[in-house]
Image (cartoon, rainbow, N blue to C red):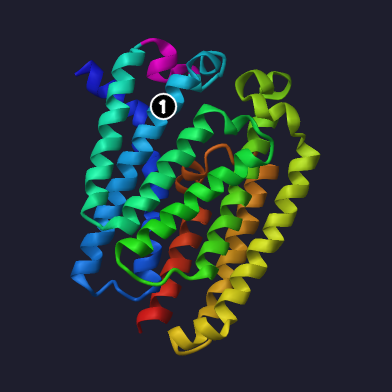
Amino acid sequence: MGFCWNILQSVRPRQWSKNLLVFAGLVFAEKLGDPERVLESLLAFCAFCAFSASVYLLNDILDRERDRLHPVKCKRPLAAGRLSVSAAAWSASALALAGLLIALSLGPAFVAVSVAYLLLTGLYSWRLKRVVLLDVMLVAAGFVLRVLGGTVAIAVETSHWIILCTFLLSLFLGFAKRRHELTLLEGEADSHRAVLVHYSPYFLDQMISIVTTSTLLCYILYTLSPETVAHVGSTHLVYTVPFVIYGIFRYLYLIHQKRGGGDPTLLLFADRSLLLDVAAWLAAALVVLYL
C-alpha cells in the first residue's frame, strides 16, 4: 500500500490536467459529436498521462539530491527516501511502455509524436533543463507536442495558429514559473535549479512582457484569419478575445501582486476568478464553433 501511494505521489496526477491539450484538435476541428474521434482522443490523453508519469519519475530520480534542499520538493518520495531509485526506474519504464502500446493503436504518426515527446522530455530532464532560455522553450515544445498528438490521433489537419498560440502561452507560463522560483528561493535559487543562476527578475519580466504581447496578438490574428473565418463560418470567435486578455492579465496580477506562478495547474484551480474565466472562454468558444 505504501509503495503504491509513493508511486502515485511521484507521478503527480494533478499535473495530468496539462494533457487535456490533446483535446484541442478534437474541439476546434468540431469533432466532439464523432464518437470514434472522441475515443481516439481519450486514448491519446491516456497515452500522454502515462508518458508524463514516466517523465516525472525520471525527473525525480535525477533531481533527488537537489530536491532534498528545496522547501517543498524535499517531501517527494524519492527525495525523502520513501521510494527507492530502482523501484522508481522500473515504474517509469513500465509507464512509458504502456503509453507506447496505446500509441501503437493510434497509428504511426501518433507513435512518432510520442517518441519525440519522450526523447524531448528525457533530454530535458537529463541535461537541457540547465541551458538558459532553452529550458523554457523545451517545456513549451512539450505542450505543442501534446496538441500535435491530439490532432494526429484523430487524423485532422493541425492548425499552425493553434501551434503558435500554444507555444507562446507555454512560454509565458514557463517564464512566470522561473520568476516565481527565483523570487521564492532568492539567494539559494541556483542550488535548487542550476539554470536559475542565469536569470534575474528584471530579465524574466522582459521575457514575460514580450510573450504576453505575442500571445495576445497571435490569438487575435487567429480569430480573424481568413482560414479561421472560413472554418467557423463567421468572425464570432473574436468575441472570445476579452476572456483571453482577462486571463493573462489576471495571471500577471497573481505573479506580481500575490507572488504566484510556481505551479500553473495549482494556480488555475486555486484562483476562482481565473478558473471562471477559462470556463467562460471555453463555453464561448464551444457556442461559436457548434451553434
Task: Identify the residue at horizontal 38%, vertical 47% (top origin).
Answer: 17
Residue 253, position in %: x, y? 66, 50
Q: Is residue 250 visible?
A: yes
Task: Identify the residue at horizontal 34%, vertical 76% (top origin).
Answer: 30
Q: Residue farthest to the top?
A: 81
Say which residue label 1 marks: 58
The boundaries of the magenta stretch are 74-81
Query: Residue type at mark 1?
Result: Leu
165 vs 76: above or below? below
* Magenta residues, dominant SS class: helix
Mark 1 element type: helix
Q: Is residue 73 shown left or right of residue 150? A: right
Residue 265, position in %: x, y? 47, 44
Q: Is residue 79 magenta?
A: yes
Q: Is residue 146 shown left or right of residue 274? A: left
The C terminus appears in which quarter of the rendering? bottom left
Q: Is residue 270 shown left or right of residue 70? A: left
Task: Identify the residue at horizontal 43%, vertical 46% (top origin).
Answer: 116
Q: Is residue 176 visible?
A: no
Q: Is residue 54 magenta?
A: no
Residue 59, quarter of picture: top left
The N terminus appears in which quarter of the rendering? top left
Task: Identify the residue at horizontal 61%, vertical 42% (top origin).
Answer: 136
Query: Label 1: few (<14), some or many (≥20) within 10 Å?
Result: many
Q: Nearer the viewer, residue 169 or 186?
A: 169
Residue 151, position in %: x, y? 37, 64
